[in-house]
Image: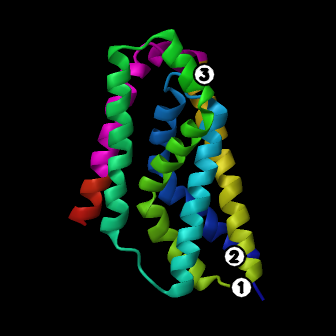
């Protein structure tokens, strides 16, 4: 018999512990010009769903995902950051309109950033799925992680939408975001290969 209270506590703690750094990533994404909030949220859900699938698959096979494989994905936010820097140099309205119309590219980029920053998620989720492996437990955990993703997105969006905060960072966000993404990519790569 599964103790769902204990499972709720374990799952919530695991999600929060492994997604603290994602708060900074979400803040950067929400502040990115021409990146619609709905695409960020869709991308975040897609990225977390992929991380959960990878973790449950790894637990099923009792395999450890090599840290360098996740670490190499750090090049994704670096590439996105470099592209944003290049876009700063010469952005016209047609290019902005074209970017907005390519919403699927936006949420796939967000999902890629989420997955590339998800080494700690995989490291935390895999042992949990190995321990709690019944259909009911896995379903409960997946549902919990998706609900927590929604809460994470809402709280972060409300935080950056506060008039005091948005007035302070609105004008510098388009300059800071590319460097933030490049920094996140460098952190992901170095964290994977150092530890």
Choose the circle earlier in sequence order: 3 or 1: 1
Please state, as top left, top right, bottom left or bottom right, where the C terminus lies in the image: bottom left
The percent position of residue 46, horizontal first and vertical second, equals 61, 52
For the residue pair 94 and 148, the one nearer the viewer reads as 94
Q: Which residue is mark 3?
A: 162
| Label pair 2/1, CB-CB below 8 angstroms | yes
Q: For marks 3 and 1, give the CA distance.
A: 42 Å
Q: For marks 3 and 2, give the CA distance.
A: 36 Å
Magenta residues, start to end: 163-187
Magenta residue check for 113: no
User: Which residue is located at x 59 percent, y 38 percent?
Assistant: 40
Q: Which residue is mark 2?
A: 138
User: Which residue is located at x 62 percent, y 67 percent?
Assistant: 11
Query: Which quadrant of the figure has residue 180?
Result: top left
Q: Which residue is mark 1?
A: 134
For the residue pair 180 and 2, the one nearer the viewer reads as 180
The percent position of residue 81, horizontal first and vertical second, equals 35, 34
Magenta residue check for 165: yes
């Amino acid at each position: 018999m599964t103790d769902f209270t204990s499972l709720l506590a374990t799952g919530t703690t695991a999600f929060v512990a492994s997604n603290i750094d994602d708060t900074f990533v979400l803040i950067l994404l929400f502040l990115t010009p021409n990146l619609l909030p709905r695409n960020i949220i869709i991308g975040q859900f897609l990225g977390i769903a992929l991380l959960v699938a990878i973790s449950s698959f790894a637990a099923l096979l009792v395999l450890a995902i090599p840290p360098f494989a996740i670490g190499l994905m750090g090049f994704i936010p670096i590439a996105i950051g470099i592209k944003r820097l290049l876009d700063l140099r010469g952005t016209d309205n047609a290019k902005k309109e074209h970017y907005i119309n390519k919403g699927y590219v936006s949420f796939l980029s967000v999902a890629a950033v989420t997955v590339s920053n998800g080494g700690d998620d995989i490291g935390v989720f895999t042992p949990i799925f190995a321990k709690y492996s019944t259909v009911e437990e896995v379903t409960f955990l997946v549902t919990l992680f998706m609900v927590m993703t929604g809460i994470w997105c809402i709280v972060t969006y409300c935080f950056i939408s506060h008039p005091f905060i948005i007035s302070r960072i609105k004008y510098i966000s388009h300059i800071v975001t590319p460097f933030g993404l490049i920094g996140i990519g460098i952190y992901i790569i170095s964290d994977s290969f150092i530890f």
